[in-house]
Each structure stands twice: as structure tokens, then as C-alpha cells.
Amino acid sequence: MLRITLRDLQYWARRFGLGIAATALVFSITLLLAGVYESFRTEAQRTVDVFHADRWIVPAGEAGPFTAQAPVDEATRARVAAAPGVRAAESVVIFRSVIHQGGGKKLLNVIAAPPGGVVRPQVTKGRAPAGAGEALADDRVGVAVGDLIALGSARVRIVGLTHDLTYLAGTPALVLTLTDGQRLAYGGARLASAVLTSGAPRAALPGLQSMRPDEVVADLRRPTSGATTTVAFQALLLAFVAAGIVGLMTYLSGLDRTVDFAVFKATGVGNGRLLGGLVLEALTMALLAAALATAVAHLIQGGFPIGVRLTPAVHLVLFGLAVVVGALVSTVSVRQALHVDPALAFGRN
């Protein structure tokens, strides 16, 4: 049956080639959307991991440090630092700003913290900022080490680059010193978005709330939860489109092979062997489309406007989807084959 299936694929090579190409295009977009979903899903955790803190202290009643509106002052930081269980406490400023780039403006996330403190992103090139007017940029910002950029009303020099420091739907981040961040966000006042601690306060702090890193991750995911769900839903819809294409190809193949099915039945070919060949044909088409889609997705990944994480898990999901699609749509040909009258092999209606 394997040889017959391969001969059938060879005979209808043009039709199956077009079907594989169309399915691969849909699968490639599905893979890219799955990569976007994976990026959205994991970027909050990756960002919070950059902050090597045991607890995040924000004003009571605020959702979290990335969505908080009320800042904390230096007196609050000192009070937190003196709390039992806290070994050290640092202020951090988190806000959004724009840089002037290529005659236009580009929105960035900005993180400002004391140099050498708890905020330690992995530096891929150059070094971390150590003084006023210096910045570390995610490589998606599109700047190079040594560039002088206009950030809001200030000018900062890029002294280092990092990778995958993005949040809020792939928006890249810039890391500054705490002094520069306070100057840009609060006009130089010694305020902060949150206080980060090494060690956890052993008692409640009046007027403040202490958040674990996982609670901060949930706070950071909240603004993009709708977009994340939408991307997942679109990927699911495209999976149905791919199933429709493969199903159409197998249906057309079944129509052209009606007499073949009748001959097989008339010559004693069992239903099991016949149906196995039909399932194999649909699976072959779906898996070839998935392999081609993987190559296409990797080719265009770099030009995608937001981050795409094509992890091994994402690839496994795609090939698993291809197997499911192939198995499900093969029922179209199976139903056709089961209802064929063996008498058709002898020219009877």
C-alpha cells in the first residue's frame, strides 16, 4: 500500500505540490503567530528575572510596579531598608519614553536603577551603565555601542547592548542609572516606581504592599493579555484553514480514485490496508507542508515587526498539529473509499 500511495502522490504531483505550498504558507503564518504568542507569554518572566529581587514594594492598592501610578519617595525606601528581614533595598524607576530615530520617534520602555545593584541584564556587547548619561539598550532598539541618542528631553550615550529585554508586546527597553531615570521621569525628585529588596519583610509595612516576583509577572502580563489571547485565536483559525486545504486536496484525490478504490476492493484488498494508505497520503502532505513552513518562517522571522520566539516546543506543536490535521482530514478519503461499490471495477453502475 505504501508503494501505491507514493505512486499516487507522484502521478498527482502538481496538484499535491500546490496543496503543500498553500498549506505551508498557512502553516508558516501559524508558526510565526505561535512564536509571537510564546514571546508574549514569556517576556514578562524574562523581564522580571532581570531584577534580582526577593520582593517588590509598591504603595498599597496599586496593581503592581509596571502599572502603578503613585510613586514612592526616598523616606519610604529607607523605611523598607530598616524593616526586619530586609538585607538591602533599592529604588527603581520604570516608565516609557521615546527616542528620536531616523527622523521619527520610537517608543521605548525605560528601567532606571543604581549601577551594580539588583537590576542586572545580561550584557551581550559593551558594558552596563555606570554613570550619568549612559545607557544599556536592547538590540531591537536599533542602536550601536557609542551612539548618542535623544531620549525625551535628554541625550544619553549607548555603552552596551543586551538581548530579549522587552515587555508590553515586544517593546524594547533601555536601562539607565537611577539618577538619570529620576531626572527624566520625576524632574530630578528622589521618587521611584518601586523599592526592590534582598530578603523579604517579615511584617506588613503600613501603606505599602510587598509583591513576590510571580505576582509582578502577573502584573506585567495584564496589559497584553487581550493581545496574547487574540494572537492565539488567530493561530487556531489558521490551523482550521490549513485543515481545509489538506481536506480539499484529499477529497479531490478521492474523486479521481473512485475506480481505483473499486478495483482494490474487487481484488480482495482489505479495508485496513486501503484506509491505511489514505491516512498515510494525508499525513505525508501535512508533514511536508509543516517542514516547508518551518523553513519559510525562519527566513522571514527577522523581518517580523515584533519579537518571535521559535522555540523547539513551538516547532513540536506545529508538527503535532500537522499530524492531527492529516489524521482528521484523511477521514474524507476514508468515507469515500468505504462507500465505493466494488462492481465499479467491472464497469457497472
Image: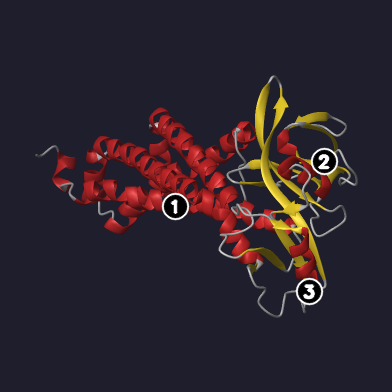
Residue 154 rendering spot, x and y as whole percentages: 79, 33
| Mark closest to the chain's N terminus, 2 or 1 | 2
Instruction: Give the number of marks.
Output: 3
Q: Position of residue 102 (x, y in %)?
A: 71, 21
- Name the residue located 47 percent from the left edge and 45 percent from the top edge: 231
Give the label on residue 253, or none.
none
Q: Looking at the image, is mark 2 or mark 1 nearer the viewer? A: 2
Tell which circle, 2 or 3, labels the residue nearer the N-terminal end.
3
- The residue under label 2 is 135
CA neighbours of label 2 inside 10 A, class few (<14), some (14 to 19), many (20+):
many
Residue position for label 1:
323
Residue nearest the viewer, comparing 277 with 1: 277
Question: Is residue 55 in view from this perspective?
Answer: yes
- Relative placement, left or right, of 177 versus 107 is right
Is 298 left, or right, of 194 in this rendering? left
Where residue 147 sits, quadrant-wise, is top right
The three-letter code of the residue at mark 1 reads: Val
